[in-house]
Amino acid sequence: RRLEATRAARDGALQRARSAESEGSGLVEREEAQRAAEEAERNTLATVEREWEQAREAEAEASIRAARMESEVERLAGRIRNARDSVERAAGRLEALENEAAELSDNLVTVRSARGEGRDALERLFADRDELRRVAAEQDRMVGFAGEAVKEAERAVRRVRDAEREAVGHRHQLEMESQEIRNQAARITERLEAEWNRPVDELLKEAEVLDGRPDELRAELETIVDALSRIGPVNMLAVEEHAEESARLDFLVGQREDLVSARNDLRAAIRRINATATERFMATFDAIREHFLETFRHLFNGGEAQLWLSEPDNPLESRIEIHASPRGKRTQRIDQLSGGERALTALSLLFGIYLVKPSPFCVLDEVDAPLDDANITRFIRLLEGFKARTQFVVITHNPRTIESADWIYGVTMEEPGVSSVVGVRLESAPAEAAR
């Protein structure tokens, strides 16, 4: 009703304005009086527009409440349907339980008659059990005798196996000694053939029987062996090993030269990359600093803001210092500002980065939460300045931000566990209200 009254008042005001304009064209001589009347009409029109704006907000709130009520009605209807289904299932379950009780009553009579028969059968089973226990005791005694016999047989088998293992070990020892003797003979044969470069059979045929006592010959042999041991072992492959080590040394030297060259190339590439990265970083940093200052002044209606590097000689590893000074305050670090000022300063920096490489879409998640009404107005004014080239998706609970949007989307739950999105195009609401 309030909206209809507002619309009627607005239509009346518009009609009066048109009548005033038509009368003013024909009554030039009463121009001053007509101007006063027009000023009054303008004031009335402004009042009507304010009332219409309030009515529009009330209509939006009523739409949201209606959507919530419809969702609640659907939810209650679902609960009623679930309750009816539960009642029907309970009735069916009750009927089944009654049938089951009747069957149990019949079974109880049968069980009572069977219990008497079972008692007689149980007495017979007890008698059979006593007889079986007596037979089992006799069998246990026989099993004990058999177990003693088996243990004695196992002890005899273990003695025989121990003797067998001892004989096998002695045989294996003899075989190892025989093989050692054969190996020594083979080594002696190979050594003789290698030293004399002749088969051992020919050497044995040509060997002469030495005259002398065995102890003298043994002493001479020891003297010769001692002289050979002082000479030391002779490496017959020294020349080949030297050639292999020289080739290995040449290969390693070449590999080292390749690694040194690759290291120098990598260092040069790193220097070039660092120089290019530093140049591009500084260019981007300067652009961000300019856009940051411009956006900061736009949000705060003046003031000063600055970005600089704590280590200018090493920009790629340096920290970035942010100092801000809203209008009427001295320059200070960002952590000394209020919550709303910090939020606006952060927005200034974000939009400063954004302006270096703009994007067609931008998502803002409750960035206006710490802002008061005055800062909300600045934030909205900032978005209005950029929305011609960027579509902003703003997640917010602030009515001022919602009011300035072209579209509003809300998430509702018409059914339990099922969410749906409701969209309203706010820019078309005035035209619909006028109709």
Image (tube, rainbow, N blue to C red):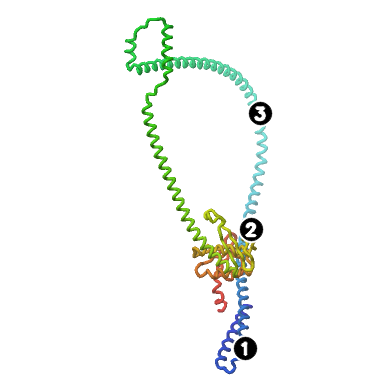
Q: Which residue is painted at 62% across and 71% down in the image? A: 61
Distance, label 2 to label 3, CA atoms, is 57 Å
Which quadrant of the view contains residue 331? bottom right
Q: Quadrant of the N terminus?
A: bottom right
Q: Residue 87 carries which label?
A: 2
The x and y percentages for residue 203 are 33, 12
Q: Which residue is painted at 56% across and 63% down in the image? A: 349
* Amino acid at pointer 2: Val
Q: Residue 127 carries which label?
A: 3
Number of disc labels: 3
Which quadrant of the view contains residue 72? bottom right
Q: Which of 189 and 299 is in front in this view?
A: 299
Q: Tag 3 or tag 1, which sits nearer the N-term?
A: 1
Q: Nearer the viewer, residue 369 or 336?
A: 336
Q: Tag 3 or tag 2, which sits nearer the N-term?
A: 2
Distance, label 1 to label 3, CA atoms, is 129 Å
Does residue 191 show up? yes
Q: How crowded is mark 1: few (under 14 residues within 10 Å), some or many (20 or more)?
A: few
Q: Which residue is painted at 62% across and 57% down in the image? A: 86
